[in-house]
Image (tube, helix red, strand yellow):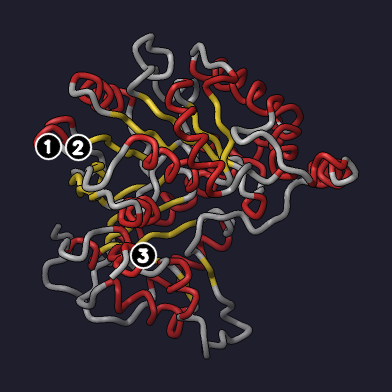
C-alpha cells in the first residue's frame, strides 16, 4: 500500500458528498460552515489590477522559483514592520498556497521515519502531508484551553523528532496562542535542536493589537523558527494559490528544490495580486478583520443559549469556533445528520484527531467566515432546536 493510500480522504471533500441527494427547503437554506475559505471575490479594485496584469506577457510565463522579487521584498518589509524583525527578501519564499509551504518545509527538514509533533485537535492537511512524506505525525495533547504545553511537548521528543508544527490563530480550534506559549515551545525547540513551524495563515484576523509574538525578532530565531503565511484569506485569493514561507536563506535553498519539482513557481497572477494587495489594501483588510471580529463576538453572544443545553465553546477566533456537543451519538454520525435534518454542513471533531482519540466524537468545528451575524443567529437557532438524545457524561473530556 502506498503512503497516499494509507492517508485518509480529504475531509472537506468527504463532507461535500453528504450534500448528494439532499435538497434543503426554501425556508431552510443550507448553512455551509464546513470550510474556512472566503466565497466572495476579491475587492473590485484588486480585480481590476489583476485584469491589467493579464495584459502583461510576463504574467503568463514561468517566474523565479522562490517568487517574484518585488513580492518577496514587499512581504519582507511588511513582516519586519509587523514583528520588529530583520526579515529580508532572502528570507521569503512564495509558494502555491500555504499547504505547499508546509509540504516544502517537511521536505526540507525531515527524512523517512522522522517525527513532527502536531497539537490535537490538528489541522488535517498537516497530518495528511506528514503521512504522504513518510513522516510520523505525533499527537501533542492540548489542555481544556486547546493550548499545548512545553512539558507535554518535551515528554514526546525522541531522537527522530524534527519539529513542532503549530497553527495560530488555530485551525480548527480558533484559539490565539499566547506569546508565552509560543516562547516556551520556541525555547524548547532551540534547546533541543528542533524546528518550530508556525503557520500564521489567519494572522490578519487576530483579535490582539500589535505583534502576536516576539519570536521573529529574536536574534537566535534563525535555524529554529519557520513561519508560514497565506494571502488567500487576506485578499480572497483562494483560487489563485499564493502563500509564503519565511525562514533563513539556507533552508530556502532546500525549499527551492521542492518547489521547482512540484510547481516550478507559484501562479504569477496570484503573486501580482498579492503584491497589489500588500501595497494598496491595508485599510480594506482592516475592515475585513473588524467584520470577522464582529462575527466572533456574535458567536460568543449566542453561546449561552447552547450552553444551557449542554454545549461548550472550547475555542473561538479568526475563522473558527470549536464546540463540544452534548449528544449521545458521535460527531461523525451527527454531522451528516445535520445536513439532512437541520440544513447545516460542518465538520466533526473526528476529522481533527487520531482515530483512537475518543474526544473527537464530542467535538465539532464551525467555520464562520461566510456567515454574518444574522446567519450565526440562524445557525444557533437550528442547533438549539435539535431533538436528539443527550449523553449521560455531558462535558466529559
- Whole-angstrom CA distance, mark 2 to mark 3, is 22 Å
Q: Nearer the viewer, mark 3 or mark 1?
A: 3
On the question of residue 291 being in view, the answer is no
Mark 1 neighbour density, 10 Å: few (under 14) some (14–19) many (20 or more): few
Q: Tell me which residue sits at (65%, 21%) in the image.
A: 73
Give the image location of residue 314, x and y in percent: 29, 51
Give the image location of residue 168, x and y in percent: 39, 37
Tag 2 secondary structure: strand
Residue 291 falls in which quadrant of the image?
top right
Residue tagged 2 = 161
- Single out the residue that lies furthest toward the top: 219
State the residue in front, 362 or 149.
149
- Whole-angstrom CA distance, mark 3 to mark 1, is 25 Å
On the question of residue 229 being in view, the answer is yes
260 relative to 62 in the view: left or right: left
Q: Are marks 2 and 1 in contact (CB under 8 Å)?
A: yes
235 relative to 319 in the view: left or right: right
Tag 3 secondary structure: helix
Mark 3 neighbour density, 10 Å: few (under 14) some (14–19) many (20 or more): some
Q: Tell me which residue sits at (81%, 44%) in the image.
A: 50
* Vertical relation: 307 (above or below) 63: below
Amino acid at each position: 500500500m502506498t503512503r497516499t493510500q494509507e492517508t485518509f480522504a480529504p475531509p472537506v471533500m468527504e463532507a461535500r458528498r453528504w450534500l448528494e441527494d439532499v435538497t434543503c427547503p426554501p425556508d431552510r437554506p443550507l448553512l455551509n460552515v464546513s470550510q474556512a475559505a472566503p466565497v466572495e471575490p476579491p475587492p473590485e479594485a484588486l480585480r481590476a489590477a489583476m485584469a491589467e496584469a493579464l495584459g502583461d506577457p510576463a504574467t503568463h510565463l514561468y517566474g523565479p522559483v522562490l517568487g517574484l522579487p518585488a513580492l518577496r521584498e514587499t512581504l519582507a518589509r511588511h513582516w519586519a514592520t509587523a514583528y520588529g524583525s530583520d526579515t529580508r527578501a532572502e528570507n521569503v519564499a512564495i509558494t502555491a498556497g500555504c499547504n505547499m509551504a508546509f509540504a516544502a518545509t517537511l521536505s526540507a527538514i525531515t527524512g523517512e521515519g522522522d517525527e513532527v509533533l502536531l497539537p490535537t485537535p490538528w489541522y488535517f492537511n498537516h497530518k495528511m502531508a506528514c503521512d504522504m512524506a513518510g513522516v510520523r505525525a505525533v499527537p501533542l495533547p492540548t489542555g481544556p484551553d486547546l493550548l499545548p504545553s512545553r512539558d507535554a511537548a518535551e515528554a514526546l521528543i525522541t531522537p527522530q523528532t524534527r519539529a513542532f508544527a503549530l497553527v495560530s490563530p488555530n485551525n480548527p480550534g480558533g484559539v490565539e496562542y499566547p506569546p508565552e506559549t509560543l516562547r516556551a515551545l520556541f525555547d524548547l525547540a532551540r534547546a533541543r535542536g528542533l524546528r518550530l513551524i508556525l503557520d500564521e495563515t489567519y494572522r490578519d484576523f487576530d483579535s490582539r493589537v500589535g505583534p502576536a509574538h516576539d519570536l521573529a525578532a529574536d536574534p537566535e530565531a534563525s535555524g529554529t523558527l519557520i513561519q508560514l503565511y497565506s494571502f488567500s484569506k487576506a485578499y480572497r485569493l483562494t483560487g489563485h494559490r499564493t502563500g509564503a514561507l519565511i525562514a533563513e536563506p539556507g533552508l530556502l535553498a532546500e525549499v527551492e528544490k521542492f518547489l521547482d519539482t512540484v510547481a516550478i513557481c507559484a501562479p504569477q497572477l496570484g503573486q501580482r495580486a498579492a503584491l497589489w494587495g500588500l501595497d494598496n489594501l491595508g485599510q480594506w483588510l482592516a475592515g475585513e478583520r473588524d467584520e470577522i471580529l464582529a462575527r466572533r463576538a456574535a458567536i460568543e453572544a449566542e453561546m449561552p443559549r447552547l450552553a444551557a443545553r449542554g454545549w461548550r465553546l472550547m475555542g473561538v477566533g479568526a475563522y473558527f469556533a470549536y464546540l463540544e456537543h452534548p449528544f449521545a451519538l458521535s460527531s461523525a454520525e451527527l454531522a451528516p445528520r445535520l445536513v439532512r435534518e437541520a440544513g447545516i454542513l460542518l465538520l466533526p471533531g473526528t476529522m481533527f484527531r487520531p482515530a483512537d482519540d475518543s474526544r473527537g466524537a464530542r467535538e465539532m468545528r464551525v467555520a464562520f467566515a461566510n456567515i454574518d451575524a444574522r446567519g450565526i443567529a440562524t445557525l444557533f437557532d437550528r442547533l438549539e432546536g435539535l431533538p436528539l438524545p443527550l449523553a449521560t457524561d455531558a462535558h466529559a473530556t
